[in-house]
């Protein structure tokens, strides 16, 4: 059966056809002789208007089919070249219906995002959330399609792991409430903060892999950009160096964003009109501007010259760029998406490849105008001695990582990869400011609604 | 750059081309004047043989490039119509290499699956596990592609939830180790056993959705078919009834299996030859045999006539079919894949639609020859009174499910969906008998390796 999305794309083709529409009422007006009921079927934010004018209809029932009611209605599609919508349905028969209770909370489209956050099980029945969620879905599909077409192996790193990835702490513990621990005595069992380390094992043998799965951080920071549970896209490619890695990130972003923009034109237009009127411009600018590669050292030099502009003015080698610096670099100084490369090793993860200068690692952050960092990645250290030394320096438990070190002993010619926080990417192409609005059921400190 | 898989598909096209091969040594033989090194690049289980005969090569080094070593080598592709492999690479230059340590544990292909299970970070470097993992990845991609092409919305149900889904207990608890619970006092926080309930909320408004994500069971049963962490495919479609639902399951299985068989022909042939020589026959039989729909009552009648064949002989209304019964039904009685429908409500979940007989629910199990159950699904109860009564009967906490009950008040004309354990499906089309061998890092009671 065709969706409303498909019908609105080719009204001429569907003109005069019999059609069975299934969906939910978003508006209902008229009188006792003719009723106009707009129905959304979930395939697009646009609705299809159904006209009831046959007097054999029960007009009292039609009056009761208020917002939120479900309906299956049969009729004939009719082109309406004069109207705002190119086509409508002239109803001949109601097949099924379910009248929504009167306290249905979505009576209009003017409800604030904050209020809708209290209704995660219903909020996607507004235009705004529907648009966001449709874009989210398309974007996820495009990510899978991108890797599929390029013969990447889709790898499932474990969620429950004895390994805490970045060594950054802030992990959730898992147990089954028994005295005897489920996974064995003296065994850590935490929720994974990254799929990368296990992903590296797969890349060593399958060459091109990616993970796309939930990851977890038990951070109590309650900001607009942090979730305790979020989805990550993490490719890892054997034989890649830092610059191959950056090229992959740039290409991935541009391809999936371009395709999503094309497939969800109506939704992104709606978000542009209702949420952030610089959205489409910003996306198109991003798509049309080649990425620049900027040495961390050069970025610091540039920022130091205008340090009076920033809250954090201590701008010198060793600074971990904050969003204010990132945005200034990409928006004002370079006027383009940029990959800042070769960061000081001190604030980067233990597994990144150490450069010959002894001070920096072969890492990159990809920054875009409007939001700052979208991607972070690196070439991995494949020298087992350097890696061991770094693990010892940082006081990370080496025993847990023996298997990871072993990957360096068996034909590892190097690999590189990166991580994209999926929700941050959805925010970027929807213009949504609060990360709680781009995931169906957000989890944050103190919030586990439903 | 082309993969070995692509080159082997069209040797004529690649003949005489310069090519840079990246991969890992799987065999190395020859003498001090000519070396034959087979290299696998991860794109297929087949390897490409590289011939080193130019005397300027360092033959002592070539001798050291034993199994597992990584190499990037340049050369000219040459068709070899007489040989087993249609094409080989005549090496001109070694670009990079990394010699594997001598204790590399995968020296040959005769290692048992049990032994390989102790090496999850390396085992995909055998033909057997490489074949399984490539099939797993293709199958996952095909599942996403199936739904994508049919405009299903890919929905991410929460992993950490205050809701235990089936009400079956056996959930993992999540905490961050603080005295103050991360998600709030008196709040349950468990790992989801299903994405369905949240998925239903999305279907009510987006109409066609699916989840494909990890789910969790803290079951201590240590069988060949159970994992504590496994991936589930769960579509949910508003307006669907039981029979729409079954048709979707049947079509999904047939399309994704057919496509995977086509895309991983070499891998499935290898699995057929080395693991289960009835594999390809069984799959093709499944693809070519239409699904039959069988009433639970009829299935019981049939089984009762041959009850002496079974371990559990108490065959009457109320029996929860065991694998022995399922296999007999599909393999012997109906000789086809079957959907058994309308099970007794007593052993089925609270949310299934109650039939008019007061005893059964609108549910189905899809059974296939060789393994038994592959899919379980149902139409959902959308009568809020019947649903509430059932929740009370079963002693499930109604407060936790208020939001789920609310979905019945706001335009719910019914929906249906099903669940497929993804690892079970991978087992089915690889012929693997132990579920631990079809997921990269299996988690079971007492096992959280790496």
Image: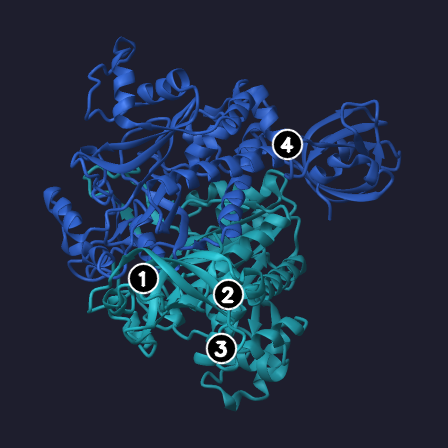
Chain colours: A cyan, B blue
Q: In the image, are marks 1 and 3 on the same chain?
A: yes
Q: Nearer the viewer, residue B213 or A24?
A: A24
Task: State the SS at label 1.
Answer: loop
Identify residue for label 2. Answer: A346
Crowdedness of circle 3 by 10 Å Cα count: few (<14), some, many (20+)? few
Task: State the SS at label 4.
Answer: loop
Q: Residue at coordinates 52% horizontally, 71% vertically from top-left?
A: A86
The quarter of the image holding the C terminus of chain B is top left
Is mark 1 in CB contact (under 8 Å) with mark 4?
no
Cα gap from disc 1 to disc 2, whole angstroms? 31 Å
Q: In the image, are marks 3 and 4 on the same chain?
A: no
Crowdedness of circle 4 by 10 Å Cα count: few (<14), some, many (20+)? many
- In the shown orientation, is residue A268 left or right of residue A410? left
Is mark 1 in CB contact (under 8 Å) with mark 3?
no
Cα gap from disc 1 to disc 3, whole angstroms? 40 Å
Cα gap from disc 1 to disc 4, whole angstroms? 41 Å
Residue closest to the far bottom = A308
Cα gap from disc 3 to disc 2, whole angstroms? 59 Å
Residue B87's quadrant in the figure? Answer: top right
Chain containing the residue with disc 2: A
Which mark lies nearer to you, 2 or 4? 4
Crowdedness of circle 2 by 10 Å Cα count: few (<14), some, many (20+)? some
- In the shown orientation, is residue A357 left or right of residue A140? right
């Amino acid at each position: 059966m065709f969706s409303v999305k498909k019908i609105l794309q080719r009204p001429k083709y569907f003109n005069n056809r019999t059609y069975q529409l299934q969906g939910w009422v978003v508006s209902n007006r008229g009188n006792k002789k003719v009723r106009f009921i707009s129905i959304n079927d979930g395939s697009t934010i646009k609705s299809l208007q159904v006209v009831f004018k046959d007097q054999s209809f029960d007009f009292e029932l039609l009056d009761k089919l208020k917002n939120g009611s479900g309906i299956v209605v049969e009729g004939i599609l009719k082109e309406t070249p004069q109207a705002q919508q190119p086509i409508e349905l002239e109803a001949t028969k109601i097949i099924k219906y379910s009248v929504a209770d009167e306290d249905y909370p979505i009576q209009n489209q003017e409800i604030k995002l904050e209020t809708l956050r209290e209704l995660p099980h219903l909020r996607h029945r507004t235009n705004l959330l529907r648009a966001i969620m449709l874009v989210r879905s398309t974007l996820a599909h495009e990510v899978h399609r991108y890797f599929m077409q390029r013969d990447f192996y889709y790898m499932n790193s474990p969620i429950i792991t004895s390994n805490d990835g970045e060594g950054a702490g802030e992990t959730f513990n898992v147990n089954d409430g028994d005295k005897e621990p489920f996974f064995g005595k003296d065994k850590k069992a935490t929720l994974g903060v990254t799929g990368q380390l296990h992903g590296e094992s797969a890349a060593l043998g399958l060459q091109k892999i990616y993970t796309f799965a939930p990851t977890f951080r038990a951070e109590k920071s309650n900001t607009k950009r942090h979730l305790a549970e979020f989805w990550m896209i993490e490719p890892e490619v054997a034989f890649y160096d830092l610059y191959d890695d950056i090229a992959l990130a740039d290409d991935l972003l541009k391809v999936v964003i371009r395709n999503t923009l094309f497939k969800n034109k109506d939704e992104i237009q709606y978000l542009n009109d209702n949420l952030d009127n610089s959205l489409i411009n910003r996306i198109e600018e991003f798509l049309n501007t080649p990425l620049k590669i900027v040495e961390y050292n050069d970025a610091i030099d540039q920022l130091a010259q205008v340090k009076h502009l920033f809250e954090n003015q201590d701008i010198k080698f060793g600074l971990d760029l904050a969003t204010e610096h990132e945005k200034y670099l990409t928006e004002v100084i370079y006027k383009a998406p940029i990959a800042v490369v070769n960061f000081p090793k001190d604030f980067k993860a233990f597994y990144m490849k150490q450069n010959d200068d002894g001070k920096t690692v072969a890492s990159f952050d990809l920054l875009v105008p409007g939001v700052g960092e979208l991607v972070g990645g690196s070439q991995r250290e494949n020298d087992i001695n350097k890696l061991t030394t770094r693990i010892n320096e940082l006081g990370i438990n080496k025993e847990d990582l023996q298997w990871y070190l072993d990957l360096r002993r068996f034909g590892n010619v190097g690999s590189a990869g990166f991580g994209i926080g999926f929700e941050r990417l959805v925010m970027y192409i929807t213009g949504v400011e609060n990360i709680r609005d781009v995931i169906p059921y957000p989890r944050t400190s103190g919030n586990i609604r439903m």
